């Protein structure tokens, strides 16, 4: 069955999701700077560009579509998030969102940044 309905998360403001990522990391003793580093690694945004996207209220679709230099190594991200294997997500935008979810999960689980960033 063809998926014609857009997922409602696509139109959610990145600035609404971002604090949840930071809070999840902080609960496990990780920092906002580490979350930012992960986002910059995945998208190619600079810190100021990232902050501008949040301030502008960019939705997730706009945020990922505007990513200046998506990291090719993000294709190495595998595993399960919310019961779904990230490498099997067909919609490219949903895959980007799941990649970020997975990276923040790894951060919260105490993984070393070098491993999270597929170094």
Image (cartoon, grey):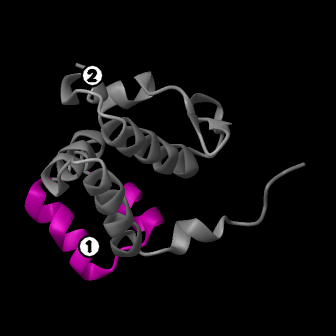
Q: Nearer the viewer, mark 1 or mark 2?
A: 2
Cβ–Cβ under 8 Å for marks 1 and 2: no
Mark-to-mark CA distance, 1 and 2: 26 Å
Relative height, residue 81 to residue 22 (above, below):
above
Residue drawn at the location 18% of the way across and 56% of the way down: 32
**What x and y, as percent, mark residue 30?**
21, 47
The residue labelled by disc 2 is: 115
- Looking at marks 1 and 2 on the same chain, the residue that comes earlier in the sequence is marked by 1
From what the image shows, is residue 91 above or below residue 74? Answer: below
The percent position of residue 59, horizontal first and vertical second, equals: 43, 72
Disc 1 on helix, strand or loop?
helix
Q: Is residue 91 magenta?
A: no
Which residue is at 30% across, 41% downward?
Answer: 42
Label 2, residues with CA under 10 Å away: few <14, some 14-19, many ≥20: few
Residue 46, horizontal then vertical, whole percent: 12, 53
Left or right: where 35 falls relative to 61: left
Residue extending farthest bottom: 56
Quick check: is 50 in the magenta stretch? Answer: yes
What residue is disc 1 on? 54
Q: Give the range drawn in magenta.
A: 46-67
Q: Position of residue 70 (x, y in %)?
A: 31, 41
Residue at left 76%, top 66%?
Answer: 5
Q: Choose top left, top right, bottom left or bottom right for residue 114.
A: top left
Quarter-of-image position of residue 84: top right
């Amino acid at each position: 069955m063809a998926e014609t309905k857009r997922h409602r998360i696509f139109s959610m403001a990145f600035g609404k999701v971002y604090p949840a990522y930071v809070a999840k990391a902080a609960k496990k003793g990780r920092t906002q700077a580490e979350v930012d580093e992960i986002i910059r690694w995945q998208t190619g945004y600079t810190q100021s560009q990232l902050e501008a996207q949040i301030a502008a209220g960019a939705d997730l679709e706009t945020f990922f579509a505007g990513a200046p230099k998506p990291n090719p190594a993000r294709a190495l991200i595998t595993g399960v998030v919310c019961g779904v294997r990230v490498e099997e997500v067909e919609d490219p935008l949903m895959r980007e969102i799941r990649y970020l979810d997975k990276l923040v999960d790894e951060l919260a689980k105490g993984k070393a940044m070098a491993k999270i960033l597929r170094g």
